[in-house]
Amino acid sequence: MKKILVVEDDMPIRNLYKEELIDEGYEVLTAHDGVAGYQLFKSSKPDLITLDIKMPNMNGLELLDKIRKENKEVPIIIYSAYGEFTQNFSTWAADEYLVKSSDLTEFKNKVKELLYR
Amino acid sequence: MIIKGTDLNAEDTLVKYQDILRQYNIVNQISRTVSNTLDLNRILKIILTGVTFGDGFGFNRAFLFLIDRHSTNLVGRMAIGPGSAEEAWQVWNEIQETNYSLEEFLNSEKFENQPQFSMLDEKIRHLSIPVDKTKIIWQCLEDGIPRNVDLTEYNKENEEKPVDKNIQNGGPISDIFICDPASIDHELVEYIDYPKFCIIPLICRTKKVGILIVDNKYNQREIKPDDIEFLQMLGQFASSSIRNTLIYNDLKDSISALAKLNTKLRYLKEYNEKIIESIPVSIFVVDHNFTLTMCNENCGILMGIEKDNIIGRQIDTHRVFIDGLDLMEELGRVINENKAEGFYKVNLSIDNKKPESIFDIVLVPFKFSEDTPEGALIIVEDVTNTVRLEQELNNAKKLSRLGKLSATVAHEIRNPLIAIGGYANRLKRKYSESGQTDMQSLDVIINEVSRLERIVNDILDYASNKEIKFSSVNISELLMECLILAEAAAEQNAIDIVFSCGKDIVQGQSLYVNGSRDHLKQALINIINNAIDASSKKDKISMCIYRQEENAFENIVIEINNIAPLGSKEDLTNIFLPFYTTKTKGTGLGLTITKKIIEQHSGRIEVKSSIENGTTFAIKLPLLKI
């Protein structure tokens, strides 16, 4: 079973993502900030990571940077509440960039795509 | 004329009379020629030529000095005579050959073309003799009596000068005046370089003009008393001619100086007038009777009357109100109290007509000259554009504050919204699988949430000051792309998008603008979608694209017209404001974002609307020069 790490500070959204991804048949780990996210990445070696950008302690871009220094292979989806970060070249290190939406269809499609590419 | 001596025989007497007649004639000829000119140099030349002309006095050389007005020195002006004995001989021969009378010679080309330059003439111009009453020439100018000077026979013993006595006693003045060379200025003695010469003072009434000196260096002929008497006569005539000419020249100089001054004044006046004409302000001048005495062209435009029909009229011929205040009363107060008054950002009413413009008006007490009573200046400046720009700036500031506030709010709203929408979606999926529950209610939740999300996205989009990355964008191609996208949406409502002009720009040409492709695309799609949304089924949307020169630039103008007019005049002014919408759907930010994008691209967007022509949005973007 593919293991997905969801790093998201907003609890309802974190749970929504978790439940939706479980429904899709994945094993889901969640972290509420970048620091916790990094620890889980080290300890559980997920097959895919989804990152929110705006988070306390360590934000998504910092975490992205940290992970990419150790692992260039693991697929990472980064998402944010608004389109500003499309302009930020740090996001290029992610495999996919998404704008947060209540419609998770695109999100789920991307996850599938990246896991089985 | 005194014929001296009684012991002359008849023949001698005849010769004498002939001489006298000849000399009279010469003076006469000189005076006639001189009277034809007012050129000082020419007059001097005529006099000196007359004195040295063989058929006339026949002196070998003649020298002329004039009193310099500034230094009061006697300054050498002109000398005529050969430089050497050989030259003298040659000159006499030449003149004898021509057989001219003096007058004929003076009027001949030979006289005209005579070279000015000679050593004698050249040197005299460097002589400047300062006033010294102990020297003979200055004494001569004081008493007005000529001196026939002989420097050869002077020695210390005959210090008692017989001539001196003669002069003092009013005796004959033509005697030889044996004198000490030291009593003649050294420079002058050196220059003349011949010990016998005659000094004739040139005095016009009491005014000293200069001196004339003649000698006979080459034939050594003695200067006779008769010669001196004639020279004196000539001297009187010459001095008045010279003085008149000097006065005339002074007058001429003052006149030309006046003329120059006049030209300068006229230039200054025109310059001032031009300034007054070219400033974009209306300036009226009224006198104490409220009569308009002057105004610039702008005044005519403001009043809607020819400028010339304003001047000379009482200002109260026109009923002018400044924001309801009577101009006449205000003017009266300004003039009486001698205090300027300003009215800023006001409306004007002229003869019951109210121009739409906004004005700054200043009334200033004004005196044209010391002896005229106080009047006033009325300065009217159209500040409509300034006021409009100020308002725009204020709006922009407000919008920017609003934008920041909205962004904060939107960002906070967003996450709960996504959670609600996400769970609603989830519920819908779960229940649709089991065939239970009220699907319609869920759909409402989902749709409304997604609408809220769009609004929030747009707000964030608008408020974020994303830096636009500029590059050259093929606007023709981009327009085509947007049209294809828009046509799909238009087809759903059976709306036809047609070109009324400029189809070739989109299909055949490649025009470029400097900008961000994504942003421009968003703006263009927004504006086309806006037209589609405003149209009813089976309506037509017409596009017109053309190039337009503006100053040094070329613009591309994209006009999009739909049939439906805007509802009200307020729509026209508010249409670009955030959340102002006439549609039931949409976020109310589409046109605001479009305007922002176009302005970020140094472009303009305008809208006009009428019942006959529907609504037209025009986007102007500066084209890149390729």
Image (cartoon, rainbow, N blue to C red):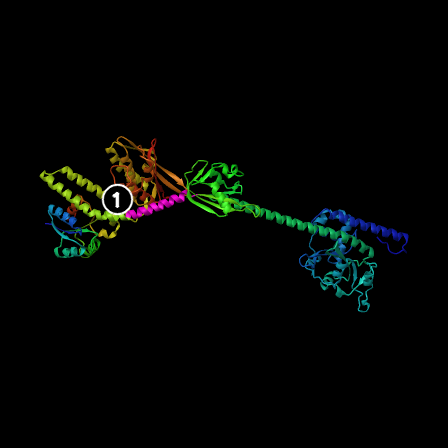
Instruction: Judge whether residue A109 is colored magenta.
Output: no
Q: Where does the C terminus of chain B fall, quadrant-wise?
A: top left
Q: Is residue B399 above or below residue B615?
A: below
Which residue type carries mark 1?
Answer: Asp
Closer-to-camera residue (B337/B237): B337
Which percent across, then down, holds residue A1?
A: 10, 49
Closer-to-camera residue (B423/A43): B423
Closer-to-camera residue (B284/B265): B284
Question: Residue at left 23%, top 51%?
Answer: A92
Label 1 marks a residue whose chain is B
- Position of residue B453 in the picture relative to residue B394 (left or right): left
In the rendered structure, which segment of residues is drawn in magenta?
B382-403
Question: Residue at left 89%, top 52%?
Answer: B11
Does residue B26 show up?
A: yes
Which percent across, then down, holds residue B466?
A: 29, 48
Instruction: Sort mark 1 into few (<14), some (14-19) or many (20+) by Cα contacts within 10 Å.
Output: many
Question: Residue at left 62%, top 49%?
Answer: B257
Which percent across, then down, holds residue B240?
A: 74, 51
- Position of residue B385 in the picture relative to residue B91 (left or right): left
> Helix, strand or loop at disc 1?
helix
Q: Is residue B385 above or below residue B187?
A: above
Kindly report the secondary structure that dominates the magenta region of the rendered protein.
helix
Query: Mark 1 highlights which residue?
Result: B458
Q: Is residue B619 above or below residue B79?
A: above
Does residue B99 show up?
A: no
Which percent across, then down, holds residue B503?
A: 33, 35
- Position of residue B368 in the picture relative to residue B423 (left or right): right
